[in-house]
Image (spheres, helix red, strand yellow):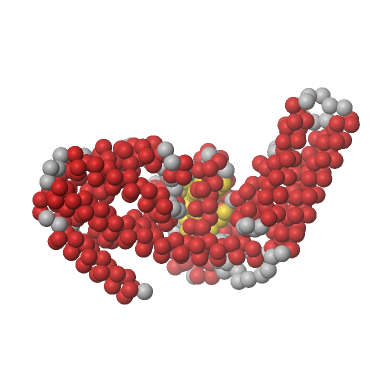
Amino acid sequence: MSNSKEDYDRLVAGEWQQLITLTSAAAHQVVARIGREDISLMVDDFYQYMLSDKDAQIFLSSQQVKQRLHATLCQWIQQVISSADAVLPDLIAAQRRVGEVHARIGIPIDLVARGIRRLKERLYQRLQQDMLDSKLCYDAMRFCSLTLDIAIEVMTTAYSRSFASAAKHKENYRLYTLLDNASLERERQLASLLNWENRFIYAIATGLPLEDVEPLQRAEFGLWFQHKGKHLFEQVAEISQIDSVMAETDTFIIGFQANGTADMQQRNLLLRTVRNNIRIISTLVSGLFDELSRYENGKDPLTQLLNRRFVPTILRREIGLAIRSDAPFVVVMVDIDYFKRINDTYGHDIGDAALKSVAAILAENVRSSDYVFRFGGEEFMLLFVETTQSQALMLIERIRTLVCATPIRTGVSQPINLTISAGLCAFDGHPDYERLIKKADSALYYAKQNGRNRIEIHKDQPQ
């Protein structure tokens, strides 16, 4: 694989250099001048055009354009159309990195092609404005067109490799979620659904306000279904039916509330309708779990937490949900303090016991809709879905306190008191999950630098 990549890079570098050589010095000068003087206005037009596209709006926002993307695109265009002065291997490597980022974020190739088409159109118009020499104008247009094509080709090859890898991991995660202790998960979710029904019946029986019963779609089962169940049973027809019955249930209850005082007949109708809907959902969920087969386990063998390799799949999905629904979520990086010292002093068995103890506390103190990963070594990652920064801070503070209160017994000496440090970052609308992880990791770094056994929240530096 590495040899074919190197061969491809040599091929592209050769063709790019040939294009540069065949283009006249005068054409290079004209293109470079436009890159210096006019590119900012072209980029303004580019983003105005792209932000009018509903598909592109998922990945762009006016605030992001203003703060970061405008300058980044200006720089990229200048580097590509001024490639006569570039070190081509470095320029090719840069295009590959852009393609990998696009794949990681999930930007469709057709959106990239659409944006480049708009950019070429504006470049051609600008070249024609004050160039009387038609041959020189053609030479400059040809260079701009082909050099942008080469850059996009390199991006696309990197995009395709990364996208194929991501698709493989997504399918591996889907298979894993299908298989991992399906019977236990079924009983847990059916119990959660029954618990909501019991709270509803109690409210009806005692005359309590139905506002005290949270909507089914916002309850524990509803959150699990939205963030895990839909992915677990991807492209199964029953999913839309469950979604529809839950929405119908919440709508029916809201309509009942709006009517104010209701007689016994109306309350009985409400009770029968909701109970019947819960039975339908329960039957559908049970049937879906009955369909599952068992495959290889996808958990970390020591801690029984999710593998790190599933992080991209899950974060991409949660980012998509958050962008569409404007729902918050938070990523937290957690690290066991002084873990190397524990390993070196007491041995790996005690180190493993420490990892398992912290992993158990993490797993037992999150909702079934949240995610806990062993990220590597003594580091863990938590994903709190539909959770604000302040809510996540309270949750992780509770976990930190529990870890402090749960010593590890060595059998030969005094128990070891563990502490953890944590870095927290709320989703800010940017579609690149690696950026979010890096921010949480940066906050974790400051937590350790500032004395450990503490939590830090990521704060963006002023622009």
Q: Position of residue 379 (x, y in %)?
A: 47, 58
Which residue: 57% across, 43% down? 386
Is residue 459 among what the camera can see? no
Using residue 79 as the reference point, say whether residue 229 is left or right of it: right
Q: Position of residue 206 (x, y in %)?
A: 84, 33
Give the vertical position of 355 relative to 296 (above or below).
above
Using residue 74 as the reference point, say whether residue 174 is left or right of it: right
Which residue: 82% across, 44% down? 275
Give the vertical position of 394 relative to 356 (above or below).
above
Which residue: 50% across, 43% down? 323
Using residue 378 as the reference point, say whether residue 363 is left or right of it: right
Is residue 101 among what the camera can see? yes
Q: Quadrant of residue 143?
A: bottom left
Q: Residue furthest left?
A: 25
Q: Residue furthest right?
A: 265
- For the N terminus, the image quarter is bottom left
Q: Position of residue 336 (x, y in %)?
A: 48, 57
Q: How many marks?
A: 0
Which residue: 84% across, 38% down? 271
Q: Nearer the viewer, residue 407 or 459?
A: 459
- For the C terminus, the image quarter is top left
Q: Position of residue 194 (x, y in %)?
A: 78, 48
Q: Nearer the viewer, residue 459 or 399?
A: 459
Give the vertical position of 68 relative to 445 (above or below).
above
